[in-house]
Amino acid sequence: MSATRDTVESTRPRESKGGGGKTGASAMSPGRGARLRGGVDVATLVGLAAAAGVILIAMAAGGSLRAFLDPPSLIIVLGGTMAVTTASFSLGDVAVAWRDAGAVLIHQTHDPRGVARQVLLLAEAARRAPETLKNLLPELRGEVFLHRCVTLVSEGLPPDDIERMLTGEVEASGSSHVKSAGVLRRASEVAPAMGLIGTLVGLVQMLGSLNDPSAIGPAMALALLTTFYGAVLGNVVLAPLAAKVERSAEEDALIKTLYTIGAVSIARQENPRRLEMLLNAVLPPGKRIQYFDRDSDRGSPRGA
């Protein structure tokens, strides 16, 4: 074990086995990220797959699935939705929105409790051995924002400057995600409208071909399927993705805010117990930690 890790271990509070407020903290060190899991977002994929499955079952129950395939209708809905959405924003905004939509399907999540404990461990390590933060930098390269926070603190920047820079980054990141969610929301509104436009096109073609019975069927298919495609694309695909991007943005902002509070507190050399109160003021009620409190069952302190 490295000297840095030994320093960290020596600064970590001991935990009684009966305490529930710091479960898992004893196996955690500041050099380890608070990332819980990464990979495919099961909830989103299961939800989309279930919705698609219900629709496919309904389609197959009434006849052939081929009856629901119509290339002109797809072109009107997909092409029209992309074109109108791009006209409402810009190519760059639309590209970033699709990137963010893909990111919520394959992403890595943080546990706010784990992040708060990691921040407190960093604060305790820095309070007892300030050089520990600089030694931990190589271990934090995987966490870009946390690495930046620790870098600013270890370089000795004034706390107010650190707070201003990190807060600006959090706001800029949040603004980008909000714009991406807005793009997807706009697309979810446009898709049903393009379906309605396709329906009108099909009805006009049908009415203009009443003297030709062979043309009525394709025109009617275009009229009905564009509405179907637009409704599915807007309400089953785009709207859920927009909501997911918004939620992801909220979670990302919370994690970065916790890191920002920790960095500023460490730079000000505040007592870690005060930092715990600041973190709990930001954490949701169900996610708050009890890092330094006393074990009510044993009557012994959890933190030295």
Image (cartoon, rainbow, N blue to C red):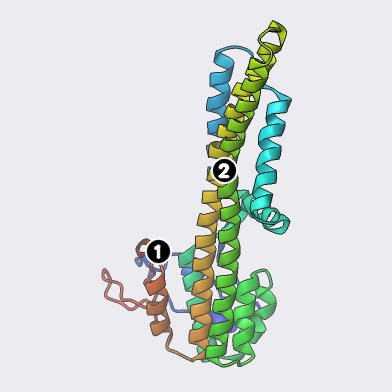
Quickly name the residue at label 1.
287
Q: Residue at x 72, y 32 (%)?
A: 75
Q: Earlier in the sequence, mark 1 or mark 2?
A: 2
Separation of residues labelled 1 and 2 (CA atoms): 33 Å
Residues packed near mark 2 inside 10 Å, few (<14), some (14 to 19) or many (20 plus): many
Quickly name the residue at label 2.
188
Query: To which quarter of the image does residue 207 belong?
Result: top right
Please identify, in this view, whether the residue under mark 1 or under mark 2 is nearer the observer.
2
Q: Residue at x 64, y 13 (%)?
A: 64
Residue 53 image point, x, y percent: 56, 27
Depth check: give the residue in front, 121 or 178.
178
Residue 247 image point, x, y percent: 50, 55
Residues packed near mark 1 inside 10 Å, few (<14), some (14 to 19) or many (20 plus): few
Q: Mark 1: which amino acid? A: Lys
Q: Check residue 296 in the rendering and tell me which mark sits there, or answer none.
A: none
Depth check: give the residue in front, 147 or 193.
193
